Amino acid sequence: MRTRRNFIITLGAVAAGSSAALACPAPVVADRNHKVLMLNAACGDPDRPNVFEPALLRINVGDSVTFLAMDEGHNTASKRGMVPDGATSWNGGLDEEKTITFDVPGVYGYICLPHYEVGMVGLIAVGDDLPNLKAAKKVRHPGKARRAFRALFKQLEVKS
């Protein structure tokens, strides 16, 4: 079972750094494989519970993303209506490490099923052409997920 503590200890053995830096490791990209952490609280901000870190990724077609269950009780699942035509949706198990390869350009919205309504959501933009962007923005969400997705789309527009 993966724990945040084991992950941090592993990072400490691999890279030197201050204890503050180890408390919130930067996402690692190796061979076009990006990492997203599933956490009970945002790094450095315990007042933001149940988050993906980072919640927004811009990647290239053919890249993969590995979702790492750093804390118990989380999963990753694509959000219906927020996956481009021709792409495969996914639904990872609770506390499961899940790797997805993104071969179709577009916007992918994803959620943690147990914490969706409280805003544990994320967004992946694959490639420069985002053919489903308008449709993805129109998907309705409950509770804090609505506000969280709006903020991610706003960040995406700023980075574009």
Image (cartoon, helix red, strand yellow):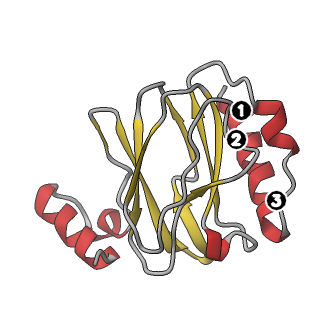
Residue 142 falls left or right of residue 76 = right
Q: Give the SS element for disc 3.
A: helix
Residue at x 67% of width, y 40% of height:
83
Q: Is residue 61 above or below residue 71?
A: above
User: Which mark is first along the chain, 3 or 1?
Assistant: 3
Label disc, if present, on residue 155 of the rendered structure = 2
Q: In this view, does 56 lie above or below 62?
A: below
Q: In this view, does 15 lie above or below 10?
A: above
In percent of width and height, residue 69 lies at 40, 69
Residue at x 70% of width, y 41% of height:
155
Mark 2 or mark 3, which is nearer to you? 3
**Amino acid on which disc 3 is placed:** Arg
In percent of width and height, residue 82 lies at 72, 43
Structural distance between the alpha carbons of marks 2 and 3: 12 Å
Q: Which residue lies furthest to the top in this view?
A: 129
Q: In this view, does 26 lie above or below 128?
A: below
Residues at discs 2 and 1 in contact (Cβ within 8 Å) = yes
